[in-house]
Image (spheres, rainbow, N blue to C red):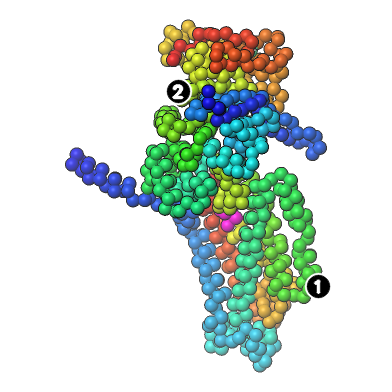
C-alpha cells in the first residue's frame, strides 16, 4: 500500500488539473426521467405519432382530397380498410382515403396543441414572471387583467368569432393562443413571488444586475421546470379543446381536417357500418393524449424531486 | 482622522405589514425593524454586529447595500447619501459594496455553474471583459478563497455548505470591493467549518484592505474578527465600542446577558460569575416597548426606563452605551 501512495497522489493531481464537468439539475432530471418506464413508453408513442403526422403522407396511395366517385356512399361495403386497395384505413362516406385524412388530421391536431402550448410558455411565463418580479401596483393591474380575461367564457366567444369571421385555422390558432397563456401566467407569477425572495436574486440586485437580466437569468430558468411540465399537460388540453370545436363542426374547414372533425364525421356514420371512420381518428386521438399525459407526469416527477 | 467610508446616521427602517384578515382599507401596521441607529465605519475597519435573531441586523445590512430603502435618517457611503445618488454613483456603490449571505446554498442560483455565479458581478460591471480574462480572473479569485479552479463548471448543489460559502465570498470579492457586508456568514455552517471561513475572511480582509460589517447572533464569533462591536436589540443600538472592551467589560445589561449566556468551560469561574438570565421572548417589533426597548426583559429595569428611550452615552472614549444605569459587572472571565 505504501508504494502505491505516490501514484495515487499523482493520479489525484492529474485529476485536479482537468476541468470537472458538473452535473446540472437538468442532467439529474434527465436521468430520473429515463428511469421512468411509463414516461419512456409515452415518449416513444409520442415520437411515433409525430413521425406518422410528419411522414405518414409519403406512403399514402391517394391524395387526401381525392374523391373516388365510385365509392361515394358505397364505402360501407366496398371501402373497408384494406392493404390491397391502398385504402389502409378505408374510405369515408365521400369516397376519400381515410388514411391520408387521418395523417392530416393528426398533424393539425398536434399543431394546434403545440402552438397553444408554445404561446402559453412564451407569453404566459414572461408575463407572469414580470408581474411577479415587479410586484406592487403593476402586479395588481397585470393579474387583475388576467382574472378578467379568465372570467370571459372563451368557448362561447371563440364559437361566436368562428361564426362571424368564418371558420379558419388561423381563427382557431388566435382563439387558442388567447386563452392558453392565462393559467401559465398565474403559475409563473406564483413561482416568481417565491423566487424573488431567494437570496441569489437579492445578491444579483445588490451587484446591480438590471431587472430584465434578473428575470431572464435568475427567474425564468428556475421557473422552467414547472413551465415545461405544465406545457406538456397543456398540449392535450388544447387538442381536446380543438377537437370539441371541430366536433361541433366549427373548427377546421374542408378539405382540411383534424382529429376532432374526423371523429365528428365518424360518429355521424356509426349506423352505416363504417366504424373505421370513427375508430382510426379516435385511436390516434387517444394514444396522443395518453402519451402526453404520461410524458407530463414523468417530467413532473423528474423535475420536481421534492416528494421523494 | 480619516473620513468614514460608511456613515449611518439616525437610520430607521420600517416595513408595512398587512394585518391578517383585515379589510383592504385598514391601514398597514408599521414594523420597526431598525430605529434611529447611528454608527460610523472607518476604512479597513471591521464592525461586528451582534443581537438576537429578529433584532434587525439583516435589515440594517440590506439598507447598507441598498436593496431596501430606509424610512428615516441617512446612509452615507464615502460621504454621499444613498438615497440621493446619481445613477453613476449608485453603480459605483453597487460595485464597491458587496454582501455575503447567511444561507450559503440559497445565495447561489441552482441553475448556474460556479464559474458563471462568480463571474456575474464582473460581467455586470465590466461587460466588455474578454471571455478569457473573465475566466482567468474567476480562477484567480477561486484560488484565493481556497477552491480548486477546475471546479468552475460544477453546480452549487454539488458542494458542501462551507464550499458554497467560499463561492459566495469569491463572488463578493471578484470586483475588489471596498466594503464587505457579511450577514451571519457562518451561522449555517458546521462548527468545524466556521473557524475556517472566519479565518479566510480575516486573511482576505487584511490582504485586500477591506472594510467589513460582520454580523452574528452571538458574541463569540464576532469578537475575534471585529475591531469594534455594536450590540443591537429590537432594532436599537445598545452598546458600541472596541471589541475587547465590549466583551471584557460589558456595560449594558443586554450585552452582559448576551455574554453570560455563553458558558465558561471552567466550573469554578462559571459558578462565581454574575449571570443575569434573559427571560421571555423578544417583544413584537410591531409595537416595541416605550422608553428603553429592553426594559421588558432587563434585570435592572427601573420605572423611569419606560419614560424615554435612553440616549447613547459616552462611557469611555470610543464607547457608547444606551443605559443610564450601566455599570461594569464581572460577567466574562473567558478572554
Ligand atoms: N421584508 C420584510 N417584511 C416585513 N418584515 C420584515 C422583513 N424583513 C424583516 N422583517 C422583520 O424585521 C425584523 C428584523 O428582521 P431581521 O433584520 O431579519 O433580523 P435579524 O437579521 O437580526 O435576525 C423581524 O421582526 C422581521 O420579521
Ligand atoms: S435603560 Fe433601564 S431597562 Fe433599559 S437597559 Fe438600562 S436599566 Fe435596563
Ligand atoms: Mg438575519
Residue A226 within the magenta-colored segment of the rendering: yes
Vertical placement of B214 versus A174: above or below? Answer: above
Q: Quadrant of ligand 2?
A: top right
Point out residue B301 in the picture as x, y percentages from the top left corner.
Answer: 65, 10
Residue shown at 53% from the left, 82% from the top: A58
Prevailing secondary structure class for the magenta stretch in the rendered image: helix
Using the rendered image, report if marks 1 and 2 lie on a common chain: no
Mark 2 is surrounded, within 10 Å at the Cα level, by few (under 14), some (14 to 19) or many (20 or more) other residues, namely some
| Structural distance between the alpha carbons of marks 1 and 2 | 79 Å
Q: Residue sitting at 53 percent across and 8 percent down?
A: B329
Query: Secondary structure under badge 1?
Result: helix
Residue identified by numbered label 1: A164
Residue A268 lies, in percent from the top left, at 72, 77
Q: Is residue B46 left or right of residue B14?
A: left
Residue extending furthest toward the left: A3
* In the image, residue B276 above or below residue A31: above
Q: Which chain's residue wears label 1?
A: A
In the image, residue A286 sits, relative to residue A31, either above or below, namely below
Span shown in magenta: A223-228
The residue that label 2 is drawn on is B224
Q: Is residue A168 positioned above or below B332 on the image?
A: below
Amino acid at each position: 500500500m505504501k508504494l502505491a501512495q505516490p501514484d495515487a497522489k499523482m493520479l489525484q493531481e492529474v485529476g485536479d488539473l482537468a476541468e470537472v464537468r458538473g452535473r446540472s439539475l437538468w442532467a439529474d432530471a434527465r436521468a430520473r426521467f429515463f428511469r421512468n418506464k411509463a414516461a419512456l413508453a409515452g415518449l416513444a408513442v409520442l415520437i411515433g405519432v409525430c413521425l406518422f403526422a410528419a411522414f405518414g403522407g409519403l406512403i399514402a396511395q391517394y391524395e387526401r382530397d381525392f374523391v373516388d366517385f365510385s365509392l361515394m356512399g358505397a364505402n360501407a361495403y366496398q371501402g373497408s380498410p384494406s392493404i390491397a386497395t391502398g385504402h389502409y384505413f378505408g374510405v369515408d362516406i365521400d369516397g376519400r382515403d381515410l388514411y391520408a385524412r387521418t395523417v392530416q388530421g393528426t398533424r393539425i391536431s398536434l399543431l394546434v396543441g403545440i402552438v397553444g402550448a408554445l404561446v402559453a410558455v412564451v407569453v404566459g411565463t414572461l408575463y407572469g414572471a414580470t408581474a411577479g418580479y415587479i410586484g406592487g401596483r403593476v402586479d395588481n393591474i397585470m393579474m387583475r387583467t388576467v382574472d378578467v380575461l379568465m372570467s370571459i367564457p372563451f368557448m362561447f366567444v371563440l364559437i361566436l368569432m368562428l361564426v362571424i369571421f368564418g371558420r379558419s385555422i388561423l381563427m382557431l390558432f388566435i382563439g387558442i393562443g388567447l386563452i392558453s397563456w392565462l393559467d401559465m401566467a398565474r403559475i409563473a407569477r406564483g413561482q416568481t413571488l417565491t423566487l424573488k425572495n431567494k437570496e441569489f436574486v437579492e445578491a444579483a440586485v445588490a451587484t446591480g444586475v438590471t431587472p430584465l437580466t434578473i428575470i431572464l437569468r435568475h427567474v425564468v430558468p428556475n421557473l422552467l421546470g414547472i413551465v415545461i411540465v405544465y406545457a406538456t399537460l397543456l398540449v392535450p388540453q388544447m387538442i381536446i379543446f380543438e377537437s370539441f370545436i371541430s366536433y361541433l363542426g366549427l373548427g377546421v374547414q374542408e378539405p382540411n381536417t383534424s382529429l376532432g372533425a374526423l371523429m365528428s364525421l365518424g360518429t355521424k356514420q356509426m349506423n352505416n357500418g363504417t366504424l373505421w371512420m370513427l375508430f382510426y381518428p379516435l385511436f390516434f386521438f387517444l394514444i396522443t393524449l395518453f402519451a402526453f399525459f404520461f410524458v407530463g407526469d414523468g417530467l413532473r416527477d423528474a423535475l420536481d424531486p421534492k416528494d421523494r | 482622522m480619516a473620513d468614514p467610508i460608511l456613515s449611518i446616521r439616525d437610520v430607521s427602517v420600517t416595513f408595512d405589514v398587512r394585518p391578517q384578515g383585515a379589510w383592504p382599507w385598514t391601514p398597514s401596521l408599521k414594523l420597526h425593524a431598525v430605529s434611529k441607529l447611528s454608527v460610523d465605519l472607518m476604512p479597513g475597519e471591521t464592525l461586528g454586529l451582534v443581537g438576537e435573531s429578529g433584532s434587525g441586523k439583516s435589515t440594517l445590512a440590506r439598507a447598507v447595500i441598498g436593496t431596501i430603502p430606509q424610512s428615516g435618517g441617512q446612509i452615507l457611503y464615502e460621504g454621499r447619501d444613498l438615497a440621493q445618488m446619481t445613477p453613476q454613483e449608485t453603480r459605483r456603490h453597487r460595485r464597491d459594496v458587496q454582501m455575503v449571505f447567511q444561507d450559503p446554498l440559497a445565495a447561489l442560483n441552482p441553475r448556474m455553474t460556479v464559474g458563471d455565479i462568480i463571474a456575474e458581478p464582473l460581467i455586470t460591471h465590466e461587460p466588455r471583459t474578454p471571455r478569457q480574462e473573465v475566466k482567468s480572473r474567476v480562477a484567480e479569485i477561486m484560488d484565493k478563497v481556497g477552491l480548486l479552479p477546475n471546479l468552475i463548471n460544477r453546480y452549487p448543489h454539488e458542494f458542501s455548505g462551507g464550499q458554497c460559502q467560499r463561492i459566495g465570498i469569491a463572488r463578493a470579492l471578484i470586483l475588489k470591493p471596498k466594503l464587505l457586508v457579511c450577514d451571519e456568514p457562518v451561522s449555517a455552517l458546521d462548527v468545524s467549518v466556521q473557524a475556517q471561513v472566519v479565518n479566510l475572511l480575516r486573511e482576505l480582509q487584511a490582504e485586500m484592505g477591506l472594510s467589513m460589517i460582520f454580523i452574528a447572533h452571538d458574541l463569540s464569533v464576532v469578537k475575534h474578527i471585529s475591531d469594534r462591536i455594536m450590540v443591537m436589540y429590537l432594532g436599537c443600538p445598545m452598546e458600541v465600542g472596541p471589541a475587547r472592551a465590549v466583551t471584557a467589560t460589558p456595560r449594558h445589561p443586554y450585552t452582559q446577558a448576551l455574554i453570560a449566556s455563553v458558558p465558561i468551560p471552567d466550573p469554578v469561574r462559571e459558578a462565581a460569575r454574575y449571570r443575569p438570565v434573559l427571560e421571555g421572548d423578544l417583544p413584537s417589533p410591531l409595537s416595541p416597548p416605550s422608553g428603553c426597548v429592553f426594559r421588558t426583559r432587563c434585570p435592572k429595569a427601573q420605572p423611569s426606563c419606560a419614560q424615554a428611550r435612553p440616549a447613547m452615552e459616552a462611557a469611555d472614549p470610543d464607547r457608547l452605551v444606551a443605559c443610564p444605569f450601566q455599570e461594569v459587572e464581572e460577567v466574562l472571565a473567558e478572554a
